[in-house]
Image (cartoon, rainbow, N blue to C red):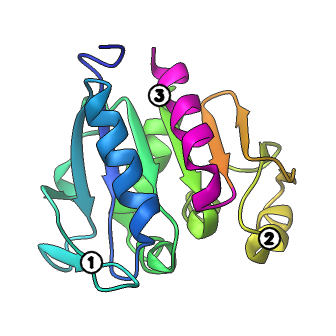
Amino acid sequence: MELTNKRIAVLAENDYQTLELWYPVLRMREAGATVTLVGTGSDSGYASEAGYPVNVDAAADEISVEDVDAVIIPGGYAPDRLRRYPAVLDLVKGVYDRGGVVAFICHAGWVPISAGIVKDKRVTSVSAIKDDLINAGATWIDEEVVQDDNLISSRGPNDLPAFCRAIISALS
């Protein structure tokens, strides 16, 4: 399996986009990675925008940056909540700064914006946050997946296969 010995944190909060959380979780596990579901610490479980539950394994302040090879940030409106927690932003920035993969999809670009890691980077997202990314100093590109060094981004659920392939490739 191509991701044996890789450790991936997938962030969760209320109103996450169901497919954007579960598709990468299952695909990364299938590839052999150890996946840890990480919440903000506000609860032990969260609900998607459709009410689908997820129980988390840990809160962001319980995860050491050194123990994570990648962070995946699902979209929906959960990123608007996630970016309000300093421990989440510290985890994302810490993983990025040490060369780990930070992957975000759809509205999840709000988290790397708040973590201060998109300036001078090429990214994509749902078009609704295009201006937010540009105003944070990123170059926005309308493609299914954009990789700039260890930052990987995609537009939405239709791009999940390409998104996951890019993550696996970056970690292999």
Identified by mark 2, the residue type is: Ser
Q: CA distance from mark 2 to mark 3?
A: 29 Å
Please report the residue visible at 21 percent of the width from the left and 46 percent of the height from the top.
Answer: 36
Q: Main secondary structure of the magenta part?
A: helix
Q: Mark 2 and mark 1 in contact (Cβ < 8 Å)?
A: no
Q: CA distance from mark 1 to mark 3?
A: 33 Å
Image-based side of 169 in relation to 135, left or right:
left
- Which quadrant is the C terminus positioned in? top left
Q: Is residue 39 above or below residue 1?
A: below
Query: Mark 3: which secondary structure?
Result: loop
Mark 2 neighbour density, 10 Å: few (under 14) some (14–19) many (20 or more):
some
- Which quadrant is the N terminus positioned in? top left
For the magenta stretch, what is the residue range? 155-172
Q: Which mark is residue 2?
A: none
Q: Earlier in the sequence, mark 1 or mark 3?
A: 1
Identified by mark 3, the residue type is: Arg
Query: Mark 2: which secondary structure?
Result: helix
Q: Quadrant of residue 113?
A: bottom right
Residue that numbered label 3 is attached to: 98
In front: 153, or 95?
153
Q: Earlier in the sequence, mark 2 or mark 3?
A: 3
Q: Which mark is residue 127?
A: 2
Please report the residue visible at 34 percent of the width from the left and 56 percent of the height from the top.
Answer: 22
Image-based side of 161 in relation to 40, left or right:
right
Q: Quadrant of residue 16?
A: bottom left
Residue that numbered label 1 is attached to: 52
